[in-house]
Amino acid sequence: MSSQPHGSRLPLLTRNERRVRRRRRLPQPERTPALLNDRNASRTSPALEAYYMRQIEMFRGEHDRQAFFRVLRVPLPSCFRLTVTHRFPYHLRQRLEREFVPLFEAGDLQSACEEAVRAYPHLAGEPLRVQPPFALPWYPDRLAWQVDVPRAILRKLPALRPFHQFLVAENVVGGMNRQEAVSMLPPLLLQARPGHRILDMCAAPGSKTAQLVDMLAAQPSSADRCVLVANDVDRQRCWMLVHQLKRFACPFLVVTNYEAASIPLRVFSHRFDRVLCDVPCSGDGTLRKSPDVWHKWSVKNGNGLHALQVRIALRGMALLMDDGTGLMTYSTCSLNPVENEAVVAELLRQMGADGAELVDVSEQLPALRRRRGLCHWTPSRDEPASLQPPSSAEQQWMHLERCVRVMPHDQNTGGFFVAVLRRLARTGREDAEMENGDGDASGAPDAAAAAVSRGQHRRMAGPADPPLEAVADAADGASVLDPIGDFYGIDRCQLRRHLYRRESTATDADSASTRRRLYWMSGGAADVAEALRSRPGRLLAAGIRAFELCEMHHHRQATAAAPPFRIAHEAVPLLRPHLHVSRFVAVCRDAWVQLLLHDGRGQPRTSFLLERLRDADARRRLQDMPCGPLVIEHVLEAERGEDAELLPPVRSHVVAWKTGANTLSFFTPVDDLEALQRLYGVSVERAEQQEENGNPS
Ligand SMILES: C[S@@+](CC[C@H](N)C(=O)[O-])C[C@H]1O[C@@H](n2cnc3c(N)ncnc32)[C@H](O)[C@@H]1O
């Protein structure tokens, strides 16, 4: 059990303990403010301070070092990224600028915040200057934002509550993603482009993967070759990753569960254009966000992780394109040179000057305040050569100064390290590995990696879903695909190439239910899924849900031509170019708002009576249509004026099933529906209020 905070009766529970209590329906003790407890109040660690006192090359003198330690004790500001995949990031940005920034400019907010801060002993004495959220100057397109007010205070102050609710609601639907500012650096420096094949080796919980999804999805036409493999050794964290990334409906995403240092080369025979290697680390760059790290910090942590970090980084390089185009970022949220420059130096040492090079990224992201990598550091005594700084001859060709260090006190962030490496040519050792089948035809980790990650095997166990199979290859494939092709007008070749489902297995008593869903995968994702068919336990998710078996089909008025599958809501933007126009109905804004509000009254399956639709043309079309699945949509255009340039048109949709001559049922997930209501500035409560006042919306 957790300890009781000194001088307080409130039990101090970890997040996990809270989750377990929730699951078991035990009462939750009142939440302890994140900063109001002993553990957090004493942000000190003699071992850490002594260690960084020795790293004199890290600082620009005593003043700099003191500023560093001072800022480490101040909680981290919150940051978030508006996601492009979500379709209306620019509308969200406009709401931020026009609606929420002014909230922070209210005259009495500064004093209200100062009052609230007094409840947090930790912040006492720290000057708190309330300033409105602002766009990070180095992030493209003003899509990443920082809020300097501590989250506990955002939640607490009534004046800021609408902003806090906005952040929470948009985070749920994927309109934005909470992500530390420094964690946005590796995907940016990796220069990921649409069409790339990318491996994210240690991906959970997935904030960088989500950012990569955004970068890759920018041009849907190049999505077919594209694949983004998000891997993590911890199976539970992999599921978290799947859950996080589901919000972004990404056909080229594959989630795998390998020990990163032994990801098999054979499976990924295509080689990757980019590898993101964000390794497990001691995490002392996150001290501001995770005060627990102060108490767990020890020199041994960093030293103990070094070997695993080197092995993972080497495997990442081995999986890269070897024609000089492949790039890998190596990153940690630690400032310890043993986990950073020492790993990069060892990797370069093993690959040789003609195998890999550090890329000079000093011209990229010019607004970012950064420091050069260290060429010298002071490890604890008697550590192996790999932890020691390079010799002066090695320094000449390694160019460790090209590594990027972000110090927390330079621009009020966490601490971070990132290096960009280019693979130059395949080394003899890797050729031999390839020829030997990489020792991993069965998917078992090699002995060395297994020893390192022994503690994680427990977490890797668990029941495996049946493997994914191409629907076209199944005995009943044609009977599933043909009605879909006929009804929706999708080309058969496309269906055969992209549609997958779980295989039925003898032991899978509930096989019918796992096969209710058909997944759409990019060509690249399908290649990986095929390669992993013999080890389904390692492939946790791939592609997006595209079609779902629907009981509406058995409705007595369903047309004989309608297939038993409806399109999944999240697949409509992807499938739209492939679908027959006859199943799309555009409605005017008035009718669209009517549908959004109808569906939002907590009874999504209640039939909507077509005769009520406030759009005569659309009503007639819908009434004349045979029963079955269809998509209703509306295009939101910015009104003429300055907004028209800033806000591109947004196409929104709801998936429906015509169940009778005059009735429709809807399948829009409630969170997405609420996001659409926010976009159109309508709410069920407001509509009800207007109805009561005799003024229906
Ligand atoms: C720093 S976190 C990654 C954060 C993630 N890239 C993000 O941006 O959200 C390190 C991750 O590495 C995973 N991990 C630890 N050892 C690993 C190994 N040997 N192979 C693969 N993943 C590993 C951990 O489970 C953890 O999720």
Image: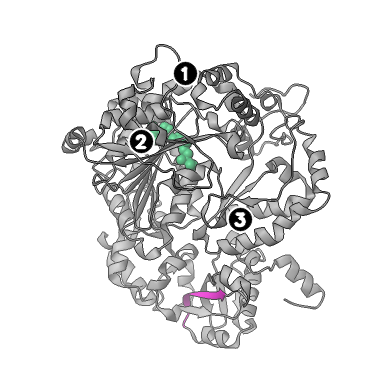
Which badge, 1 or 3, comes first in the chain's sequence?
3
Verify CB contact (< 8 Å) between mark 2 and mark 3. no
Does residue 204 appear anywhere in the picture? no
Q: Does the magenta segment cover residue 340?
A: no
The residue identified by callout 2 is: 260
Kind of residue sitting beneath label 3:
Glu
The residue identified by callout 1 is: 300
User: Which range is magenta?
Assistant: 626-636
Kind of residue sitting beneath label 1:
Lys
- The x, y position of residue 79, in whole percent, is 60, 46
- The x, y position of residue 538, in whole percent, is 35, 42
Tell which tag, 2 or 1, sits nearer the viewer: 1
- The x, y position of residue 198, in whole percent, is 35, 48
Kind of residue sitting beneath label 2:
Ala
Q: Quadrant of residue 10?
A: top right
Q: Does the magenta segment cover residue 632?
A: yes
Does the numbered disc 2 mark a residue whose Cβ is under 8 Å from ligand 1?
Answer: yes
The residue identified by callout 3 is: 170
Q: Which residue is found at the position 77% from the left and 26% from the top?
A: 9
Ligand 1 location (quadrant): top left
Q: Quadrant of residue 369?
A: top right
Does residue 215 appear anywhere in the picture? yes
> Could you say which disc has been placed on residue 74 in the image?
none
Of residues 332 and 467, the one drawn nearer to the viewer in this rendering: 332
Q: Which residue is found at the position 50% from the left and 21% from the top?
A: 55
Of residues 144 and 54, the one drawn nearer to the viewer in this rendering: 54
Q: Residues within 10 Å of mark 2 (few under 14, many from 20)?
A: many
- The x, y position of residue 181, in whole percent, is 55, 44
